[in-house]
Amino acid sequence: MKKSGWSDHELEALLRRMPKILDYRDPHDIYQNIYLRKRKTYVWALSGITAFAVVLFVIIKIF
Amino acid sequence: MDSVFDELYHKYHHDVFQFLFYMVRNKEHAEDLVQEVYIRVYKSYHRFKGESSEKTWLFSIARNVAIDFFRKQKSSKEKLLDQFEGQANQLKNGHLIPEEIAVQKDEIKLIYKCLEYCTLDQRTVIILRYIHDLSISETAKALGWSESKVKTTQHRSLKMLKKQMELFSEKEGVICEKVRVERSRA
């Protein structure tokens, strides 16, 4: 590495030799994580809608 | 597992994971973000019209996920003093070089180190063009750019990389010289 400069061509060749990086997790685990996260947003959305409905109901009752 | 996940996993999972890893330079973050890519895919799968290839479409989603990640990181960073955070990050990143990179020869390790100094756009182009071997037009589609913008960014990023690499190898050269001088004195 005692070079003082690299040509574009050399640099491109080096970049193409960058190592492959793999995800070693089990695909089932990944799927599970995604499923749980999807569910979480669903639950949040549902509780948001419910809260809104309750507030609306109370307002209607008052007036 | 459903069929959409199964198909995407087998065709593209490792590509998307690798792209995210080189973007955020941390395996654990890449693991989280690749899951976020699937969630966004589920949300917009019905909108995918096949105008671009599935692969470039996935890369464009992955890029947006990475950009959002950096945005979030930045806003939490602003609460802390930049200086200290910068130092802490340098230490952290130094420790987080994965084994796949650590076992490579010095020039590869140097490139990896210098990639950090490219802007996000420059890094994206380098990763897509050279590490994933996408063509100029595929890269342009994945980024939603014109081909000429890809070309200029590519040119600039190579220049930036070269500059950083020269700077670091010079520094290391100076250190080597020092050691040699000290040894000859002893």
Image: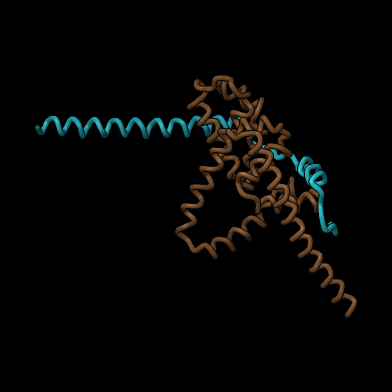
Q: Position of residue A21 (x, y in %)?
A: 70, 40
Q: Position of residue B120 (x, y in %)?
A: 60, 46
Answer left or right for B83 relative to B19: left
* Residue displayed at 66% across by 37% down: B148
Q: Quadrant of residue B166?
A: bottom right
* Residue displayed at 79% across by 46% down: A8
| Farthest residue, direction left | A63
- Front one among B67 and B186: B67
Q: In the rendered view of the protein, which quadrant contains the N terminus of chain B? A: top right
Which chain identifier belongs to the brown chain?
A: B
Q: Position of residue B132 (x, y in %)?
A: 71, 35
- Front one among B96 and B132: B132
- Front one among B84 and B123: B123
Is B129 above or below relative to B82? above
Colour scheme shown:
by chain
Which chain identifier belongs to the cyan chain?
A: A
* Residue displayed at 74% across by 50% down: B111
